[in-house]
């Protein structure tokens, strides 16, 4: 045990913070020299009193978080663990809310079972962010609402520190978003970090100073933003949607037909039925996290 040699005071235990998820948590939209930073790194601060590991990978699905990130995160033995994922799942042809719920429940259970306090967030749907036409946007919105409902249920079950990032006040502020409209800009990442910091502090888990809201570098100019969108942003969307487009067109066709017939509520009912089944599959008695 280390500490003050004169008084024998033990040194404070550094907080071990693990971040799991996809491009949002990997830091896309918040460039720094040689890579990306992002909200999780901003929340961790300068490393004083915090040991931080970011396991998030751009493009990760919920199954990737469970199969590839969670074992390493559990081995890291975190005190805090962020689990923010699900948007990429909505952009896949084989979207299955019941499978997603089961996997996310296991991820949360594995981390909370070892004593980690969890950080979670509900997220906006890509159709709204990209301002897609209604027949294309509605199926994506329906999927993301289902994902958010699962995350809300798990947030209650595991007593997580939770943010509502699908709220209109967050999605409508263009200054918070990068040019691709799918990832936060630096200011958006800072906003997420600051809100998590406030919520953690309210529960006695403050991580150093509150992250500053003001960007520490000028935003990219229009030319740089368009160049990034052409080189990286468009490719990101194309890679995520490569197996979705035929299915999305089918969904859009069905959406248009149902709404023309006045039977659009049937699609909502099917989604609600699938969501109910997903929620029924969640583990019955996850222990609340002790703070």
Image (cartoon, rainbow, N blue to C red):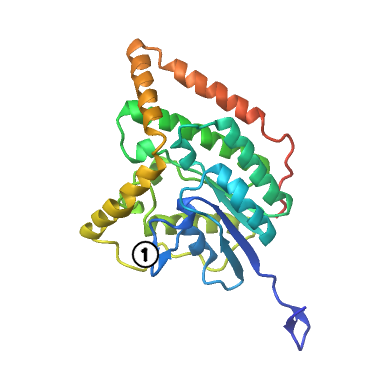
Seen as rendered, the residue at the extreme top is: 261
Q: Which element carries disc 1, helix, strand or loop?
A: loop
Give the x, y percent position of residue 165. 46, 45
Work out whether 162 lies above or below 189. Answer: above
For the question of whether residue 162 can be seen, the reply is: no
Q: Foreground residue, 157 or 82? A: 82
Work out whether 217 lies above or below 120. Answer: below
Q: Foreground residue, 79 or 72? A: 72
Does residue 9 appear to the left or right of 117 in the view shown?
A: right
Tell me the residue that label 1 is attached to. Answer: 215
Quadrant hosting residue 285: top right
Quadrant occupied by the C terminus: bottom right
Q: Foreground residue, 76 or 244? A: 244
For the point 62% across and 25% down, the residue is: 277
Quadrant occupied by the N terminus: bottom right
For the point 45% across and 59% down, the residue is: 38
């Amino acid at each position: 045990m280390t500490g003050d040699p004169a008084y024998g005071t033990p040194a404070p235990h550094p907080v071990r913070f693990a971040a799991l998820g996809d491009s949002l948590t990997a830091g896309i939209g918040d460039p720094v020299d040689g890579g990306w930073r992002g909200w999780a790194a901003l929340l961790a601060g300068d490393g004083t009193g915090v040991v931080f590991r970011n396991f998030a990978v751009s493009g990760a699905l919920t199954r990737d978080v469970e199969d590839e990130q969670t074992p390493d995160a559990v081995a890291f033995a975190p005190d805090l663990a962020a689990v923010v994922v699900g948007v990429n799942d909505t952009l896949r042809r084989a979207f299955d809310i019941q499978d997603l719920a089961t996997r996310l429940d296991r991820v949360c259970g594995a981390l909370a079972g070892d004593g980690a306090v969890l950080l979670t967030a509900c997220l906006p749907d890509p159709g709204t962010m990209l301002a897609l036409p209604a027949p294309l946007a509605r199926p994506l919105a329906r999927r993301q609402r289902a994902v958010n409902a699962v995350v809300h249920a798990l947030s209650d079950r595991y007593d997580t520190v939770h943010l509502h990032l699908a709220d209109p006040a967050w999605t409508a502020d263009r200054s918070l978003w990068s040019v691709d409209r799918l990832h936060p800009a630096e200011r958006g990442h800072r906003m997420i970090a600051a809100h998590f910091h406030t919520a953690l502090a309210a529960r006695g888990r403050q991580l150093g100073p509150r992250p500053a809201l003001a960007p520490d570098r000028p935003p990219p100019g229009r030319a740089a933003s368009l160049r990034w969108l052409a080189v990286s942003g468009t490719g990101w969307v194309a890679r995520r949607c490569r197996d979705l487009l035929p299915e999305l067109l089918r969904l859009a066709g069905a959406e248009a037909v149902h709404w023309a017939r006045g039977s659009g509520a049937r699609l909502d009912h099917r989604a609600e039925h699938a969501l109910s089944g997903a929620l029924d599959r969640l583990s019955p008695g996850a222990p609340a996290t002790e703070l």
